[in-house]
Image: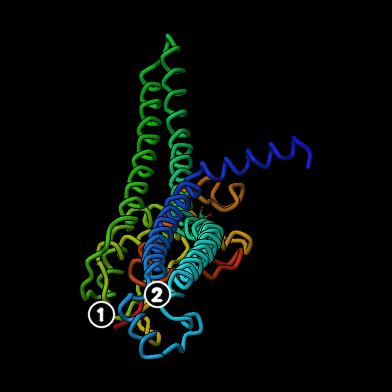
Amino acid sequence: MDLRKLRKALQRLWAVLYSATGRLAASYLAVIMVMSLTYSYVLYSTSAHELGRMPPRDLYEQQVESGDTSTGEMAGGVAARPRFDEFLRERAEEGRRVLLQRLIVINLLTLAGGAWLSYYLARRTLQPIEANVEAQVQFVSDASHELRTPLTTLQTTNEVALRNAKLSTAQAREVLRQNIDEVGKLQELTDGLLKLARQDTEALPMEQVSLQRVAGDAMNRIVAPAQAKDIAVEDKVRDIAVKAHAASLTQAVVVLLDNAIKYSRPHSTIVVEGGRRGKHAYIRVVDEGPGIRPSDLPRIFERFYRADQSRSSQHVNGHGIGLSLAKKIAGQHGGTVDVASEVGKGSKFTISLPLG
Ligand code: ADP
């Protein structure tokens, strides 16, 4: 290996060691090695002490006098004692050396195995945390991007109006109307972001609620936009009890209804169905809107995702937050939101919640 390669390898090793994973792995390894070395030290000192112990002189002499010389080395009587002591000392020394060698090898193996294990455990510990931090960073950057568009529009319309020395009252009123529109969008966006952030951390208190009541409350909240587009909303929800957080579930249904109205053409019909299916309660919003392309379907529940801007959403306000909020709420209830859609025919969004 030439010197440059070696330097690169060392730099890479240093980067790994200095990363969060490397430092956590080093702490794990330090714990493992402290335990291993302490254990080795205790084992070595106890064993070395035991190996160094000579048989008591009385016992040795008794054995020699009674002619019990079954231990070969003891043969030769009291006169052989110094030689025997010497022999025992040598054996003890040899024993200590072998023990020390083995303990060193065991500790080196522990160091190598421990380093691998520590790195593996550190990676496993940090991976979900890193993914979380990355998601947060992405969220903040997407949210800032979304906030920038209405802010820029606000700034430009106001600047243009200010530069116009002959601004009429009618023009000024138009600028104010546009400002109010943009502020409304900003409010909608920040409300959505706040709800998403809250849903991330809050555990919802559940109670028995009526599915019909939830659907009814949600439908009451979209009367104005439905009337504005002359869209009929049919209620076909059966009354069953579900364990839910009423306000959040209503919020999720409002998202689906709101989308159905936003994306449907005027004078169409939206049907809200609901009831029990097997072990689940469901609530479904069926519209006659433009439908969603199969390639967009897997992504529409992602935060800030809006399907094909040139088709369905071009003239429709939104930030791509509604469905991710609905999905989160369903998840908090142990349920799901599914979609079935056909381009040109319409979409069916279904919230399913486990019963009992
Ligand atoms: P937003 O409606 O604010 O864009 P959502 O998260 O509610 O955000 O929806 C994501 C995307 O899914 C929308 O931009 C739209 O393209 C698509 N979508 C959602 N509901 C419908 C629907 N009922 N009909 C057609 N497209 C829809």
Residue shown at 43%/18% (left/top)? 161
Q: Is residue 122 above or below residue 68?
A: above
Q: Is residue 8 visible?
A: yes
Q: How is the image coloured?
A: rainbow
Q: CA distance from mark 1 to mark 2?
A: 13 Å
Residue 111's disc is none
Q: Quadrant of the C terminus?
A: bottom left
Circle 1 is placed at which residue position? 241
Question: In the picture provided, is 89 more to the left or to the right than 283?
Answer: right
Question: In the picture provided, is 83 more to the left or to the right than 53?
Answer: right
Residue shown at 32%/75% (left/top)? 56
How many labels, in total? 2
Please state which of residues 86 and 92 is positioned toward the viewer in this rendering. Answer: 86
Q: Amino acid at mark 2?
A: Ser
Circle 2 is placed at which residue position? 352
Q: Callout 1: few (<14), some (14-19), or many (20+) C-alpha neighbours within 10 Å?
A: some
Tell me whether the residue at label 1 lies in contact with that at label 2, contact meaning CB atoms closer than 8 angstroms.
no
Asked which secondary structure carries label 2, the reply is strand
Asked which secondary structure carries label 1, the reply is strand
Q: Callout 2: few (<14), some (14-19), or many (20+) C-alpha neighbours within 10 Å?
A: many
Q: Is residue 113 visible?
A: no
Q: Position of residue 94 (x, y in %)?
A: 52, 66
Q: Earlier in the sequence, mark 1 or mark 2?
A: 1
Q: Is residue 257 above or below residue 26?
A: below
Please state which of residues 91 and 316 is positioned toward the viewer in this rendering. Answer: 91
Residue shown at 57%/40% (left/top)? 14
